[in-house]
Amino acid sequence: MTDRFRQALKERVLLADGAMGTEFYRRGVFINRCYDALNVSSPDLVAEIHEDYVGAGADIITTNTYGAERLRLAQHGLEDQLADINRAGVALARQAAGTTHFVAGSMGPLPLKIQPSGPISAVVARQTYTEQAALLIDAGVDLVVLETFRQLSMLKEAVEAVRQVSSEIAIVASFAFKPMRHYFVGPTPEEVARAVTSWGVDVLGTNCVNGPSVMLDIVERLGSASQIPLSVMPNAGTPEQVDGRTLYLASPEYMAEYARRYVQAGVQLVGGCCGTTPEMIREMRSFLQSVEPGRRRISVQVKSGPKVQPMEPIPVKERSRWGARMGSGFAVSVELDAPRGLDPSKSIEGAKLLAENGIEAVNIADGPRATARMSALALGLRVRQEADIDVIVHYCCRDRNILGMQMDLLGAHALGIDNILCVTGDPPKMGNYPEATAVFDLDSVELVRGVANLNRGIDFGGDPIGAQTKFVVGCGNNPGFEPLDREVDKFRRKLQAGAEFTFSQPLYDPRLLEQFLAAIAGFRKIPFFVGILPLASAKNAEFLHNEVPGMQIPKDIRSRMGSASSREAQRTEGLRIAAEALRHARSLDQISGAYIFPPFGRYSAVLEVMNLAENITTV
């Protein structure tokens, strides 16, 4: 299972469980108890918590053995139960985890520091950790988590003790930092990263002490100083005393939003520490699926066997006007805003205006930022009926199970909607119905594969449908995503699944685009359309940079917007910046066109950008 854990870590973001100690406290166990001993004295309670975390969507279940080493158990007179407590801890976690989830053996810091800062010798520390590690590994954990360490030398002894027992077991080394206003009490993230890098651990991370916001800065600093995969497990905010009880009051939504930000910062293993509940882990799972859905999903593939005879897809140029146009000179598609209510007239008039001015296509987002709008498929049909312009409909995985997706797509084909952009979709908590349930049966890669199979006459389950669709299959990409290699790998998988064109996130830094194009230079070539979003104001630029996932507005661009003297001057500067981006895109051989967003639904602004790009003298 250790090898499977390492492979999973390469393939997707893993979600660990949350707190054990504060969860025991929340469920009525007083703090004067030895929580590790509950493995023996109250196994049903321990099992219940593990099962709640499995049900919430955690990939990793951590054993209730954080303090189950000889020195801490001796404080409760329980050192003679050392073996029983550790073995029971692993058995209870494995019972809940089964064979589909990973079991992490938890080992925490010793009760006192090691010499010269404390009374415990390095020899005793090594012996203590070796003893516990041997019990956990022998009982069958898939990995060992060394968590909440505050002394670097103690963490090193723990790592070497685990390695002394097993050279193969995966290790997560997690440090508990204590930042003050302008400095750290103890080592800095950079110092820890530089030290741990040479120790042969699989994951470097941080947990406990700090809430989500502070943790984001810490993990970014860890990542800047080391190439080891990162983990982060924050507390659920700062504890407060309420009616004599210590409570953590961060909301599940707050924890989940930061989980997503951690992944965008390059973290590969996310979980929670003190105060984190199964409800929070459930919410984190939902948000993480919008960034990189887990691979434990319905697989969309063609079945082998004599019954299935995949058809040869219709040539792209014969499927739609967009299919015939893309790749033949620089083409432009403009995003059409679906109405929040019943009247689509503004969108339809916008499409007519764009068609009259030579725009090749409009694309319609599918509930962008999880807001409830008119169905993109319905608006797409109205536009096709009333405007002479091709339509690209975004289709996201958030709202529909695999049954609903296939029904929608077969219906779209029947209605003549032939261009589909496959996207994962933002989580509902971002939008105006935060209580809505996210589905995510598939991610964007699997949806691309499913639509490509429909073009071969095969449904999502691998069965023939008697004919074939003629969708032009698109996907998204984000050249500004960090780490870049993960986005490049995901784009590669979309190409392998059958993507035939791609739209990028809006870009303001030409270097990000050129870096991404260089990284995918060896991949199968498909038409690439650069996202361009004119900035409406300095405030708009700051919002997009700080609040919209995946958006990066360079400091010099934000400064240009802020230096404009009035709101109208800022609008003009935003159009000029967009025109510069469009002009730059036109100069690149790898670029087939642009995907332009009308700022706040002003379609005339798109035409202004295009005119500026033609006439601008400096870029």
Image (tube, rainbow, N blue to C red):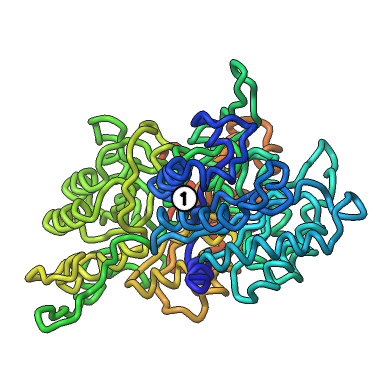
Q: Residue at x 51, y 29 (%)?
A: 28
Q: Residue at x 17, y 55 (%)?
A: 412
Amino acid type of disc 1?
Leu
Q: Which residue is mark 1?
A: 288
* Local SS, label 1: helix
Describe residue 606's horizontal placement relative to residue 120 as left or right: left
**Quadrant assignment, res 405:** bottom left
Q: What crowding class fits label 1: few (fewer than 14 Cα within 10 Å), some (14-19), or many (20 or more)?
A: many
Residue 539, percent across and down? Answer: 60, 34
Residue 169, percent across and down? Answer: 59, 71
Tally of numbered discs:
1
Describe residue 256's horizontal placement relative to residue 450 as left or right: right
Q: Quadrant of the C terminus?
A: bottom right
**Quadrant assignment, res 573:** top right
Q: Residue at x 79, y 57 (%)?
A: 154
Describe residue 298's horizontal placement relative to residue 187 as left or right: left
